[in-house]
Image (spheres, rainbow, N blue to C red):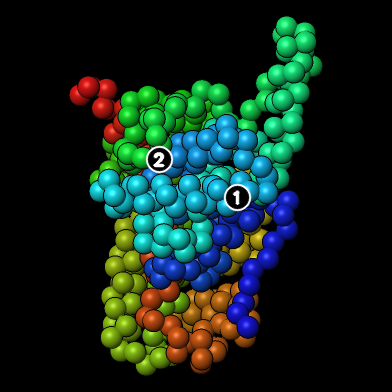
Amino acid sequence: MGSTFTWLDYSEHERRKMLDAIALLRERTTRDELGLGGVRDAFADLMFPGTSTVQTVAKYFLFVPWIYLALERKGTPSAKVALQARKAEIALAQELEESGETGGVIGRIAKETLQRLPSSIYWQGLHRWGIRIFGGSQDEYHRSLDVFYQRLRARKSGRHEHEGETADEPDLHNWHVGLPKPDDGFPEGAALPLNVEEARYLRERILANCSQSLLAYLVREHVDVEEIPFVWDLPQELPEKLRNQVEHGRNFSQTMHGAQLLYNLILAEKRVWSEHVDVYRGDLEVWRQRIEKRISALYAWDRQDFWRVVYHGNPRVSPRARSFVNSWLDLAIFPANVVALADKQAARQLVEDREVQLKGSLARVRNQRARDLWNGEAGAAQLDLRWTSARGIVSDILAGSEAKAHA
């Protein structure tokens, strides 16, 4: 019998986090083997609200509400809306493929077997950006539509009788009223690039609902991000609050990368896989040199303020995660330790104990069967704090905005 995940229906935010985590399991370099995801997401949510690791294209922030608004206009009942939306989202993928779109098209390969639809991937972000007005989960939205239609009919009837809207009956909308309209015949002719109106709209939604974030700063200041590998490589002088978030995120990402690499080195040694042992020892040497160049800044790092920022972004970071991070930092940024950290028993024991703490008897460091299934790389990539996804979305919005100059 296969393993399953379950969650409580009221915790929509946690449900989305779990789905994103499951998606990441398919990407061998980005898996969270040491339980760093809570801290990583704290920075990602602060800097890039409304985004997730599996979002890559800004246009889906419009595709999803367009699909649902079309179904609302038809009066699609609650019992049928999920199925009709699924059909529309798969049809959209087919239209995008036929128009020549490849990268970023959700469902292009899976087609009818697609399990996680664009609406599910973008649902939380649509609310965070103020595009989705309905505040509940996707299932709750589906269930609410029959009552929604009844209220619409009642309001229209009341208007006829009273020649106007009653003061205690607000406008009924599940989606933001300023949403640009799709081209006639949508999804026919759909394309991923944003036009000027669409780009301006998404920019306005970000600025209105996430105004203090780095995401808002990037679209407001039209910062070219396409060739920037990590968020801390931005050449602009950021406002102090954003600069502080980025610097804390950089320190966390760069220092904890050593623990990720050491974890993989330990597995390679236990597997007696000499090729991978050499790779990870080489990677750890590169990491050591990078840390040594920044050792003064890291040694002066205000960790109390770091944790203040972390818990502001994610109050659910566990005490065990905090203890592991602090213990690793005590080892990694101490000048006398960093030179030989790859062979330091305290560092190795810390990493092994952390995996056991998370996985129990299934931890690779203790379980031969689990170790035999290791493919040579698990969670070895440096954490980019969701920069790759955010960079793509910002680039889409700025490219659409630039189209005005060429119109």
Q: Residue under circle 2? A: 187
Q: Position of residue 247 (x, y in %)?
A: 43, 46
59 or 327, which lies in front?
A: 59
Q: Is residue 324 above or below residue 170?
A: below
Q: Position of residue 309 (x, y in %)?
A: 57, 45
Q: Secondary structure at mark 1?
A: helix
Mark identifier at residue 303: none
Q: Position of residue 138 (x, y in %)?
A: 63, 47
4 or 347, which lies in front?
A: 4
Whether residue 244 can be seen here? no
Apparent side of residue 149 relative to residue 200 in the rendered image (left or right): right
- Where on the picture, by quarter, is residue 188? top left
Q: Residue at x 52, y 35 (%)?
A: 70
Q: Position of residue 103 (x, y in %)?
A: 31, 52
Amino acid type at circle 2 is: Pro
Q: Is residue 297 above or below residue 167?
A: below
